[in-house]
Image: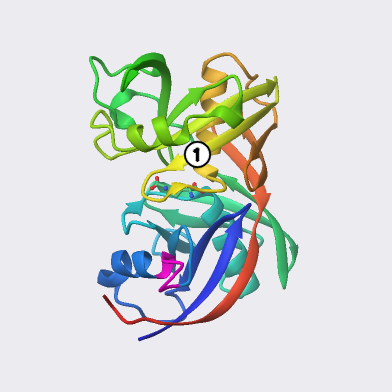
Amino acid sequence: MKIPFTKMHGIGNNYIYIDAITHEFDASTFNQLAIDVSNVNTGIGSDGLIVIHPSDVADVGMRIFNKDGSEGQSCGNGLRCTAKYVYENHLVSSSVFRIETKAGIVTVEVYGERECIEQVTVDLGTPLLNRSQIPMHGPDDNRVIAEEFQVASQTLQVTALFLGNPNAVFFVDEIEGAPLHEVGAIVTEDPRFPDRVNVGFVEILSRNEMNYRVWERGSGITEACGTGASAAVVAAILNGYIERGIDVTVHLSGGDLCIKWADDDHVWMTGPAETTIQGVFHWKRS
Ligand SMILES: N[C@H](CCC[C@H](N)C(=O)O)C(=O)O
């Protein structure tokens, strides 16, 4: 089966995008297609698959499938690239439009020439802070801020919330020493998170700057995670490390994002979106 695709990335968080507005695809194959396109040896190589699709409730829709075939609710880097694609391909007419995701409808604004969008701002909406909204098992339905969290033989402090996807955030002194494998790989599958969880590590640099690294639900370590970085800014504010309502520079492995948890409770993320390849994937369905 020949699958036309576009590979794009948001500061290194790269996905294979298929345009289900222009072409027809069998939605029942998306989970397996995500696994197959992500395989760098027998596929194309990516952090997963993103499907751009028609929407009855927004200008377009976006579905995100991780490298393991699981479906996420949203994708910050993916939203910026989806916005770039639909604007450059004249699937929307305005530079401000709405994208439907499984986590809700988001508003995006693209900046640059029609033929080449470089920066995109996404209004990710409001973070969900109560335990049941994350979701996370526990003794109450309060917020999860610097809560003791046993991982193997270590007692850590976790801050958890839902922003596009479930996120668990740990603050560390030095980002280079962040225990991505020892803690990230374990916590992402921890039964206290019934839908699994993206695991972020944060080093606070100043009142408006931080380092962030991530072990993503369903994809492992990636160069960047837009919803994760945005959730980490919210977590840093909840812990009093960073002020609310200001632009925060978040340094990820693949580059920087500018994120603000505004006074209207919406979280705004601005960053780049880039096209890498366009082609046709010759899919031998496994
Ligand atoms: N792994 C995530 C989906 C991708 C999110 C990430 N790549 C982003 O940029 O937000 C999840 O299943 O929750």
Question: Is residue 284 shown left or right of residue 47?
Answer: left
Q: Is residue 218 above or below residue 7?
A: above
**Magenta highlight on residue 165:** no
Residue situated in front as seen by the camera: 240 or 22: 240
Q: Which residue is mark 1?
A: 214
Q: Position of residue 48 (x, y in %)?
A: 43, 60
Which image quadrant for residue 136? top left
Q: Position of residue 40 (x, y in %)?
A: 46, 67
Q: Position of residue 276 (x, y in %)?
A: 63, 69
Question: Is residue 68 shown left or right of residue 191?
Answer: right
- Provide the secondary structure element on which disc 1 rests: strand
Residue situated in front as seen by the camera: 227 or 148: 148
Q: Is residue 160 above or below residue 66?
A: above
Q: Is residue 263 above or below residue 255?
A: above
Considering the image in quadrants, where does the N terminus appear?
Answer: bottom left
Residue in view at x 32 percent, y 68 percent: 30
Stretch in magenta: 37-43
Asked whether the viewer can see residue 103, the reply is yes
Considering the image in quadrants, where does the C terminus appear?
Answer: bottom left
| Crowd band around label 1 with a 10 angstrom C-alpha radius: few (<14), some (14–19), many (20+) | many
Look at the numbered disc 1 and say if its residue's Cβ is closer than 8 Å to ligand 1: yes
Residue situated in front as seen by the camera: 229 or 134: 229
Q: Please, what is the dominant secondary structure of the magenta stretch?
A: loop
Total marks shown come to 1
Asked whether the viewer can see residue 265, the reply is no
Hey, what amino acid is under mark 1?
A: Val
Q: Position of residue 80 (x, y in %)?
A: 59, 55
Question: Is residue 251 shown left or right of residue 53?
Answer: right
Residue in view at x 25 percent, y 28 percent: 192
Residue in view at x 32 percent, y 18 percent: 153
